[in-house]
Image (cartoon, helix red, strand yellow):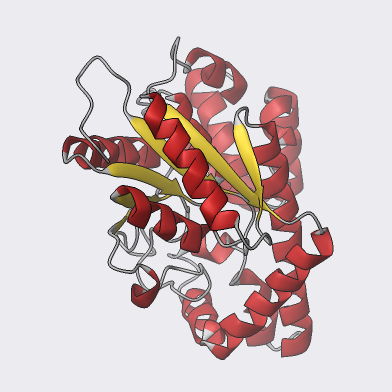
């Protein structure tokens, strides 16, 4: 990157997004090599130490010596929110830019990418004493279906964006509503700044043939199993009461029935492949709704050259 920006100029930021198994990691590294960049991981699970296989964490040999930030920094029992990510990524971006290098956001967690690039401000929200425990007790007494129905009544928009079985997010949304009296959608509308804090180019990777994406996902799961995914899933299963985020994550919970002796390994593996394909569809939906994403054919032989050219033109605009 040529020269660092002065204070009045928005810093340029690149982002590489898209569904799982499209080659985001490799493209992020290639762009960093081309433009003296450093990678900020925008993946909600790669933040955790020891969960390497199931999160498809970048391997040391894949980095080509490019610094990868926001990876391996928390123990699996520590919570981490989108607000935490925006704060962390903001600090990292400022440091990378101040050193005259280019920040490159790489990852498939759409909420993280969008919140950071749009400059979403998260108000410090103190949960009233005992509220979290009260909600947990209600969940145990009434069951998840009743809690989800309560959320649908209180905040229909938030409920529509949360899977009924995702008890952690259902309780978090209810907690926000009871603590503030406001819907999450209201908070979101009030939290956007008048203009975005960065000048960004967002490159999206996808395959024109959906079947090709699904084949790559299936193959990735098989490779993960060869690389020791089952041992990692067993670790999460054994600590499921404290590794609460990981215990909800795709890649681990699908094997719990196998450890409990209620389903064969083949069936659990197929369930993981299906869950990963469904997740890829949700990721695509999210990124397709983000404005300004420049989509690239991940299967094209010149995809890296095309991305480098687009980034060069973007940076030249200053």
Residue 72 pos. (x, y %): 32, 64
Give the camera-side residue of 68 and 240. Answer: 68
Does 126 sit above or below residue 101?
above
Q: Is residue 172 left or right of residue 6?
A: right
Q: Is residue 233 visible?
A: yes
Q: Quadrant of residue 30?
A: bottom left
Residue 262 pos. (x, y %): 75, 85
Q: Is residue 71 left or right of residue 139?
A: left
Q: Residue at x 67, y 39 (%)?
A: 286
Q: Is residue 133 left or right of residue 1?
A: right
Residue 244 pos. (x, y %): 49, 60
Q: Residue furthest left?
A: 99
Q: Residue furthest top?
A: 194
**Which quadrant of the rendered structure holds the N terminus?**
top left
Q: Is residue 7 left or right of residue 69?
A: left
**Which quadrant of the rendered structure holds the C terminus?**
top left
Q: Residue at x 73, y 41 (%)?
A: 285
Does 8 sit above or below residue 220?
above
Q: Residue at x 56, y 15 (%)?
A: 189
Does 281 sit above or below residue 114?
below
Count of marks, rendered view: 0
Residue 218 pos. (x, y %): 72, 75
Q: Quadrant of residue 272?
A: bottom right
Give the camera-side residue of 307 and 268. Answer: 307
Q: Residue at x 42, y 68 (%)?
A: 58
Give the camera-side residue of 107 and 267. Answer: 107
Does 210 sit above or below residue 62?
above
Q: Is residue 108 visible?
A: no
């Amino acid at each position: 990157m040529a020269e660092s920006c002065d204070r009045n100029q928005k810093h340029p930021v690149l982002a590489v997004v898209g569904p799982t198994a499209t080659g985001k990691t490799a493209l992020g590294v290639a762009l960093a090599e081309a433009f003296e960049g450093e990678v900020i991981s925008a993946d909600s699970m790669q933040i955790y130490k020891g969960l390497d296989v199931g999160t498809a964490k970048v391997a040391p040999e894949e980095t080509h010596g490019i610094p990868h930030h926001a990876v391996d920094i928390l123990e699996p029992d520590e919570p981490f929110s989108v607000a935490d990510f925006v704060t962390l990524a903001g600090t990292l971006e400022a440091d990378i830019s101040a050193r005259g290098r280019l920040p490159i956001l790489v990852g498939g967690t759409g909420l993280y990418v969008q919140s950071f690039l749009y400059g979403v401000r998260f108000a410090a929200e103190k949960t009233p004493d005992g509220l979290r425990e009260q909600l947990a007790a209600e969940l145990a007494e009434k069951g998840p279906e009743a809690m989800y129905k309560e959320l649908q009544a209180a905040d229909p928009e938030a409920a529509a964006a949360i899977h009924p079985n995702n008890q952690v997010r259902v309780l978090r949304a209810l907690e926000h509503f009871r603590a503030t009296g406001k819907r999450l959608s209201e908070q979101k509308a009030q939290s956007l700044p008048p203009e975005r804090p960065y000048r960004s180019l967002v490159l999206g990777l996808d395959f024109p043939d959906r079947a090709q994406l699904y084949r790559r996902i299936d193959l990735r799961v098989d490779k993960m199993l060869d690389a020791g995914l089952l041992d990692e899933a067993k670790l999460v299963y054994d600590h499921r009461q404290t590794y609460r985020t990981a215990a909800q994550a795709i890649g681990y919970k699908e094997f719990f029935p196998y450890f409990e002796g209620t389903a064969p390994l083949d069936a659990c593996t197929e369930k993981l492949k299906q869950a990963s394909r469904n997740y890829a569809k949700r990721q695509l939906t999210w990124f397709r709704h983000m404005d300004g994403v420049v989509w690239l054919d991940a299967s094209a032989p010149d995809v890296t050259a095309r991305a480098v050219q687009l980034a060069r033109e973007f940076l030249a605009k200053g």
